[in-house]
Image (spheres, grey):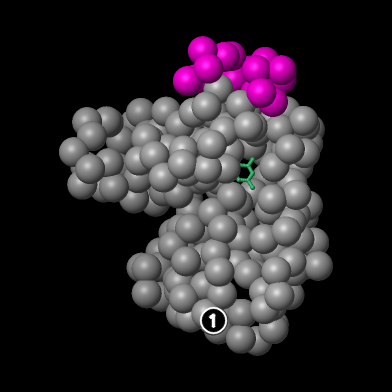
Amino acid sequence: MIIAVDGPTASGKGTIARALAAHFGLPHLDTGLLYRAVGRQCSLNHGNADDPQDALLACDFPDSLLRDPELRSERSGGLASRVSVHPAVRQALFDRQRTFALQPGGAVLDGRDIGTVIAPEADVKLFVVASVPARAERRFREMQEQGRAVSLAEIAADLEARDARDRSRAEAPLVAAADAVMLDTSDLDREAAIAFAIRIADTLR
Ligand code: C5P
């Protein structure tokens, strides 16, 4: 069984994907982390994330970088969204994601283009959304817990900028697959969102 979980930043897709993986006993890949690693490597190389050559060179990041806590920062998220625009970067990361999706027994992947590009044949496709205020509020609380000082308005502006870039790029834009089930988590708590996702997956698989 392949489960694809796509959606914008801070929609709850990561939480839902991890819970589905645990529930069905499947391996999980957070594909955003790969793009974050490319963005981070590009900055370590003193490259420009908007330059396709610099971004492509950064795809050669060491696996150890995937464990760097800095990848979770808003800065790495912004860099990820900039390097992910380049078709050569998406191509360089394709095989790794596709191989993960096709492993015997199945897998759960979350990202932006899993149901449309990486695994269009996925058995279960979820497109997780939430309003900007709901997502900004969640991100704000996460940041506070990590002791990072940021304003709610700053987070909301950043989310909208990242969404706009992800939705408008020419290659693999953020868009729901025609056969994806929409899940709006704006008014759901964690448990309710997870229960809903498990019910959908049980129905579709
Ligand atoms: O999901 P996350 O916020 O970690 O992703 C960071 C950025 O990586 C996204 O804003 C998006 O630009 C890019 N991304 C992508 N395709 C994916 C996963 C992430 O373009 N499958």
Q: Is residue 193 above or below residue 145?
A: below
Residue at 57% x, 33% y: name it.
61
Looking at the image, can residue 76 be seen?
A: yes
Image quarter hosting the N terminus: bottom right
The verdict on residue 105 being magenta is: no
Q: In this view, does 58 lie to the left or right of 79?
A: right
Question: In this view of the protein, can residue 178 be seen by the observer?
Answer: no
Name the one closer to the observer, 190 or 188: 190
- Circle 1 packing at 10 Å, graded few (<14), some (14-19), many (20+), is some
Query: Who's the residue at 63% across and 69% down the image?
Result: 107
Task: Provide residue 63's location: percent of width, then percent of height.
Answer: 52, 43
Residue 29 position within the rendered picture, expressed as x and y whole percent measured from the top left: 56, 58
Image quadrant where one finds the C terminus: bottom right
Q: Residue at x 64, y 32 (%)?
A: 59
Relative to 174, does residue 2 appear above or below in the rendering? below
Which range of residues does the magenta coloring cover?
Answer: 43-57
Report which quarter residue 170 is drawn in. Answer: top right
Q: What element carries label 1?
A: helix
Q: Mark 1 points at which residue?
A: 24
Q: In which quarter of the image is residue 150?
A: top left
Q: Magenta stretch containing residue 48, yes or no?
A: yes
